[in-house]
Image (cartoon, rainbow, N blue to C red):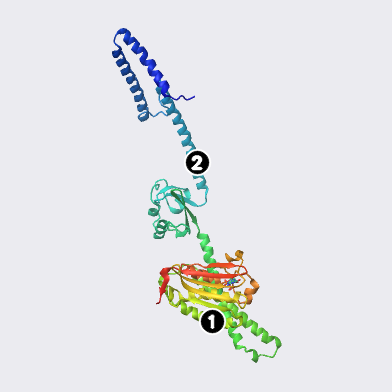
Amino acid sequence: MFRVINKRTLIQRLFMYFLPLSLIGVLIGAPFLLLFLGTASLLFWHYKQLYKLSDWLHNQKSFNPPEGEGSWEQIFDGIYRLQHRNRDKRNELAGLIRRFREGAEAVPDAVIVLQKDLSIVWCNKLAVQVLGLKWPSDSGQRLDNLIRHPDFAKYMNNNDFHEPLELDSPLGTEQILEFRVMPYETQLMVVVRDVTQLKMLEQIRKDFVANVSHELRTPLTVISGYLEMMDADAMPPLGIWGKAHGTMSEQCERMNGLVNQLLILSRIEGPRKTEQDELVDIPNMLKLILVQTETLNADKKHVIELEVDANLSILGKTEELRSAFSNLIFNAIHYIPEPGHIRIVWQMKNGEAHFAVHDNGEGIGPEHIGRLTERFYRVDQARSRKTGGSGLGLAITKHVLSRHESHLNIDSVVGEGSCFSFSFSNERVKNLK
Ligand code: ADP
């Protein structure tokens, strides 16, 4: 068992050392001389042990400390034990790091661990291949010095890693890379994924929808042109003709609307340049939309209440904003039971321009709310088809809003009604007063 030197033992030892010395000193008549010699040799012996320890600490390569003597034996023994305990801990830690690295090497993505100042702590082999990093020579280098792209530097310095960043490969290959950053403790983990295939598929899908919609336009124009020319009255008086002509014209018009909405959607997918912004007189736009709703609302007899700030306009794209505002108003008119109550608000709220359409309809179940902005998603297919809805309206609204740095909020309580709203930041606001 490891012995601890305690005060009592020390005093006992000193006593056992100096007592015989003093006795002999008294016997030979020179007690002070003997005490002095005893103290000096004790000091000399301690210095020798200290020297041994210091020599081992600074000059010796051996892992185990030298053999100690007397009370020093316990100190050397303690150091020996400490050394062994540290070595075990070190081995354990090295094992942990090795296992982490093996795990990170097995990940099918490039992984880089960074300090908060963006200097590289570690990267896996894929990071070397995908980003052209050199390991270990790039260790300690700042990642934004090695990936020289203004968007990357901006993204890393913004410190907001909720959304991933997409960049072309810094190696000049045709790859598109997605960077995800996960901060933990005092470090950051960057995971880089090759999303070229995904982007290609997305582009193919976009092109397909845009091309099909475009190609459908010509046959549709021809059909509706002929339908207009074929006046039902001028045709043989077959009972079915009148009905068929009406249905064909109606469906043609519906398909036209659908194709146009699909074309709008493919046009507005993706970000827009803010230089294209213009001053949009929203109060006037709302007035025009309400004029359009008059015929539709004449049958439904909904009460429409307005709370509009007549001076509040914003910067944006007129056509896009018109569809976002009108989709919400038309939806309220279409989907609430008649006669209902609709309240339209366009006012400043919490420093932002806020638009809201409140209705007292049947409301929408929470299971549908998250999906309403998906293309072709309709809560009640049959009812929506009856209203002529395509299920694209809210998808368009969502894209338009994201191109104006805004997003759609939907609050709804089944049996009480819904509120569709969005806000624009103060930078877009133009007060005309
Ligand atoms: P649609 O062209 O079919 O109207 P939207 O994308 O505009 O498509 O709307 C999607 C669905 O959301 C609609 O089919 C309808 O079921 C539901 N919806 C939209 N607005 C309301 C509302 N104010 N009240 C109840 N349901 C609504």
Residue 355 location, x and y as percent?
49, 72
- Badge 2 amino acid: Leu
Q: Is residue 390 above or below residue 367?
A: below
Identify which residue is drawn at 45% across, 74% down.
Answer: 317
Residues 40 and 84: in front is 40
The C terminus lies in quadrant: bottom left
Q: Quadrant of ligand 1?
A: bottom right
Task: Name the secondary structure under disc 2.
Answer: helix
State the residue position of label 1. Answer: 292
State the residue position of label 2. Answer: 96
Instruction: Determine crowd level at label 1: few under 14, some 14-19, many 20+ residues with C-alpha closer than 10 A.
Output: few
Tell me, yes or no, whether the two marked residues, 1 and 2, touch with CB atoms within 8 Å: no
The answer to which quarter of the image holds residue 370 is bottom right
Residues 216 and 163: in front is 163
Q: Furthest-right residue in view?
A: 239
Identify which residue is drawn at 50% across, 47% down.
Answer: 104
Disc 1 to disc 2, C-alpha distance: 69 Å
Residue 258 appearing in the image: no
Q: Quick one: label 1 or label 2, which is nearer the N terminus?
A: 2
Residues 351 and 67: in front is 351
Question: Would residue 401 appear left or right of 220 to someone viewing this image?
Answer: left
Residue 237 appearing in the image: yes
- Badge 1 amino acid: Gln
